[in-house]
Image (cartoon, rainbow, N blue to C red):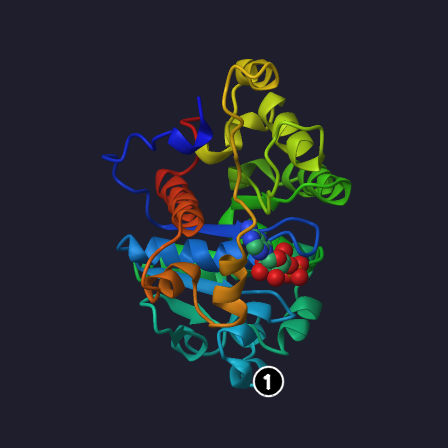
Amino acid sequence: MNSETVEVKDVEREPITGQAVSVNMLKGGVGKSILALNIADRLSVRGHDVLFIDLDPNGHITESLGYEDVFADPTHDLTNIIIHEYGEFEEYIYPTDWEWDFVPASVKLSTLESELSDNSITLLKRNFVQPLLENEKYDYIIMDGGGEWSHIAKAAYGAAARTIIPIPPGDMNRSGFKRTYDRVISEMPDELDFKILAIVPNMITEYIKHDKADRRLLENLNRSETFSKYLPSFARIPPEDWDAIDSGKMDVPKPGLRKNSNLENALEEENMPFGRYIETQDSISQNDGLTLKHLDELAWIIERGGVTDE
Ligand SMILES: Nc1ncnc2c1ncn2[C@@H]1O[C@H](COP(=O)(O)OP(=O)(O)OP(=O)(O)O)[C@@H](O)[C@H]1O
Ligand SMILES: [Mg+2]
């Protein structure tokens, strides 16, 4: 089966709203921010009320979207509401040009980081995320959980208990993924009912015929009993297909979220989500169409509460 022709089924099912998701991985530069932003945007395009929270102390998305002033503003300090339970939610939430709402990062995330400790892992959930989901203000809250391992990243995991994990090819990313799984996800307390919603092979450039990093990533994940069930349809290649690919009996697929320069340019040059950027173009290339379809599948996976019915 060619991964590009796999149809997303079960579209009739009611979306599971009231979920928060932390997009994270214990490794820099894997696509956490770009995926979190664009998944939030696609959920909003699909008709949901969405809040996107930038919890990365570097404020990459916050600055790229043009909220530099908020980033530099010491009064935009989530510590007040999350730790000291002081102030109103609205003070921290900004509208965007794209229907969804946004909690920008700020220089004060370092204060939040130092005031959160292991035993305050539930505060982000209790004092911010949960009330915003419970009073049905938002259907989904998507968090960019930040780069390195931190109290904030851990709090985001705890607040969401749902994660999407991007993983590009290469040994460093593989060990980052292993660290994330062994040290963080496996250690989440049972009562959180922690769930991986999807593992997303990202920045794939190669066909997967040759024994290169791209193939190793896709093949290892697809052959893994533990992880294959988290792969979106666009990254799935069933075990029996690998032989058919190698013997030339099957077209060589181009699975995974592909490296697409427009995905990067939309944010870095045009300061907007990818889908909004390609809407401004006269025509949509096949690559861009495919990238958008894959982002929509990730939004759909969140609506459905996972890739498979577990
Ligand atoms: N599929 C893709 N195609 C093209 N560019 C991509 C893709 N995924 C990520 N990128 C680019 O790679 C870089 C790293 O991605 P991103 O900033 O989202 O990663 P990150 O994990 O959030 O990094 P950090 O740890 O620094 O926060 C960015 O410039 C981003 O635009
Ligand atoms: Mg980032």
Task: Say which residue appears at 31% left-offset and 30% top-offset.
Answer: 9
Task: Please give the residue where the numbered disc 1 appears in the rendered image.
Answer: 72
Q: Quadrant of residue 106?
A: bottom right
Which quadrant of the frame does ligand 1 lie within?
Answer: bottom right
Tell me the element at label 1: helix
* Quadrant of image for the N terminus: top left
Residue closest to the far left: 12
Task: Say which residue appears at 56% left-offset and 19% top-offset.
Answer: 245
Query: x, y percentage for residue 124?
Result: 53, 61
Q: Is mark 1 within 8 Å of ligand 2?
A: no
Q: Is residue 130 visible?
A: no
- Crowdedness of circle 1 by 10 Å Cα count: few (<14), some, many (20+)? some
Task: Say which residue appears at 62% left-offset and 41% top-offset.
Answer: 188
| As drawn, 61 above or below 220 | below
Q: What count of labels does the image hold?
A: 1
Task: Say which residue appears at 63% left-offset and 77% top-offset.
Answer: 108
Query: x, y percentage for residue 55?
Result: 57, 65
Seen from the viewer's position, the closer of residues 77 and 294 is 294
Is 215 placed left or right of 82 in the picture?
Answer: right
Query: x, y percentage for residue 125?
Result: 50, 57
Residue closest to the far front: 248
Is 50 placed left or right of 2 in the picture?
Answer: left
Q: Amino acid at mark 1?
A: Ala
Seen from the viewer's position, the closer of residues 282 and 63 is 282
Query: x, y percentage for residue 231?
Result: 51, 32
Is 86 placed left or right of 204 in the picture?
Answer: left
* Quadrant of image for the C terminus: top left
| As drawn, 244 above or below 62 | above
| As drawn, 270 above or below 155 | below
Q: Is residue 275 visible?
A: yes
